[in-house]
Amino acid sequence: MHFEITEEMKKKIFVYAGSLSIAVAIAAFFFYFDRVIDILQFLLSIGFPFFLGIFLAFLLHKPSRWFEKKLFGSFKFSSKKKRLLSIIISFILFLCLIALFFGTIIPSLIDSAMQFSDNFTAYWDRLVTYVISLGSSWNVSVSSIEKALNETDVLNTITTTLTKYLPEIANYSYNLIRLVINLILAFVSAFYILLDKESLTMGLKELNYALFDKTTANFITAWTEDAKLVFEKYIVGSIIDSSIIGVSCYIGVSLLQIPYAPMIGFVVGITNVIPVFGPFIGAIPVIVLLLLIDPFYALVFAIFILVLQQIDGNVLKPIVLGDQLGISGFWILFSVTIGGGLAGVVGMFLGVPVFALIYAGVRDFSKARLEKKKIKVTEKKGTIS
C-alpha cells in the first residue's frame, strides 16, 4: 500500500516535532539546571574578552562613525584610512577618559572613604542614641536594645570579614596577568569589529539566509536590527545619562556643602543605571548616612535628589534614551525584578533591554501569524471568527 505524505502533513509534523523539541529542551534545562549554569559560566569565562570586545565596540561605534563621517569626511583619504584614524582617535579618547576617572575620581573616593572610616565610631554612637530614643518612645526595653547593639560590633565584623577573605583576595591577585591579557584581547576584538563591521555583518547575514527559509531569515534580520538599536541606544544612553547625573549630584552636593560629595556623587551615578529601583538604591543609604551626621543634611539631600531625579526622568532620559524599548511601565518593573532575581545588579540593568527584545519578537511573531490567519483582534468583548 502506497502512503503519500502531503504538504499539509509535512507542516503538521514539523510543527509537532518543533513543539516537542522545545518542550524537551525546556524540561532538560530545568532538570539539569545546575549543570546548564556551570556550562554557561564556563563558556562565558572563555568568551569573556570577546563579549567585552563587543561591548566596547558598541560604546565606540557612534564616536568612531562620527569622526569618520564628520571629521574626516572632506579629507582626501581612502575610506580605510579614514576609518582607521577614526577608530584610533576613539580608542585614545576612551583611554583618556578612563585615566581621568582613575586619576581624579578614585583618589577623591579614597579620601571620602578614609574620612568616613575615621568618623565611623562617632556615627555608630549616634545611631545607638537614635535607636534607644526610638525604643523609649515605643515602650521597648532600653536595656535589651543596648545589649543587642553592644553585641553588634560592626567594626569588628568588618575586620573579621576582611581577614577571612584576605587569602582569597591574594589568590585573585595572581590572576592579574590573565585580566590584563583579557583586556588586551577585548580591545583588539573591538578594534577589528569596528574595522571590519560591514564584512562581519554580511557574513552573519549570509549564514542566516543559508540556514533558514526566507521568511524566518527576514524575521531574524529584523529582530537583530532591533537588538542592535535597543542595546546600542539603551546601554550607551544609560551610561551617558548616569554619568551626567553623577557629576550633577557631585556638583550640587558640593555647592550645598554636604560632606562626602565625591562618594555620594559616585554612588548616585552608579546606581542610576538601574531602572526603577536605581534612584532608591543609591539615595536611601546616603540619606541614612547623612541622618547620622546631621538630619538637616539628610533633609536637604532628599529634596535635592528628588528634584534631580524628576529632571532626569522628565527631561534628560527622554533626550538621551528616547522611546526605544516599546514596553509599558509594568513590563519594565517586571523585567527589572526578574533580571535582579536571576543575575543581581547586572540582571537588573540588562533585564529591561533583553525583555524588550523578547517582547518585540513575540509581538511580531503573533502579528505575522494573525495576518496569515486573516484574524483581526479588537478590544470588543466576545469571540473572534
Image (tube, rainbow, N blue to C red):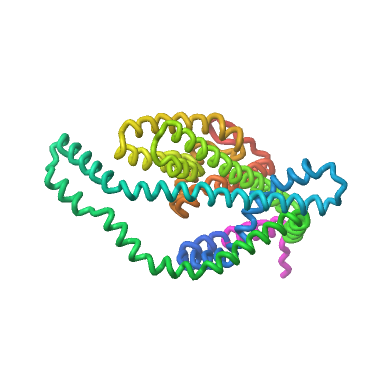
The x and y percentages for residue 268 are 46, 41
Q: Residue at x 31, y 46 (%)?
A: 119
**In terms of depth relative to the viewer, which is nearer, 198 or 212?**
198
**Eyeballing the image, is 79 above or below 246?**
below
Q: Quadrant of the N terminus?
A: bottom right
Identify the residue at the far right of this view: 76
- Foreground pick, 110 / 214: 110
Task: Give how far across and how far down residue 366 sits, in percent.
Answer: 62, 44
Q: Is residue 238 left or right of residue 12?
A: left
Magenta span: chief secondary structure: helix
In the drawing, does residue 248 fall left or right of residue 236? left
Residue name at image x 31 percent, y 35 percent: 294
Q: On the picture, is 42 further left or further right than 224?
A: left
Q: Is residue 3 magenta?
A: yes
Query: Which stretch appears magenta?
Result: 1-21
Residue at horizontal 70%, vertical 57%?
191
In this view, the residue in front, 189 or 112, is 112
Please say whether residue 339 is visible from this viewpoint: no
**347 shown above or below 48:** above
User: For residue 229, what is the image quadrant?
Assistant: top right
Residue 347 shown in magenta: no
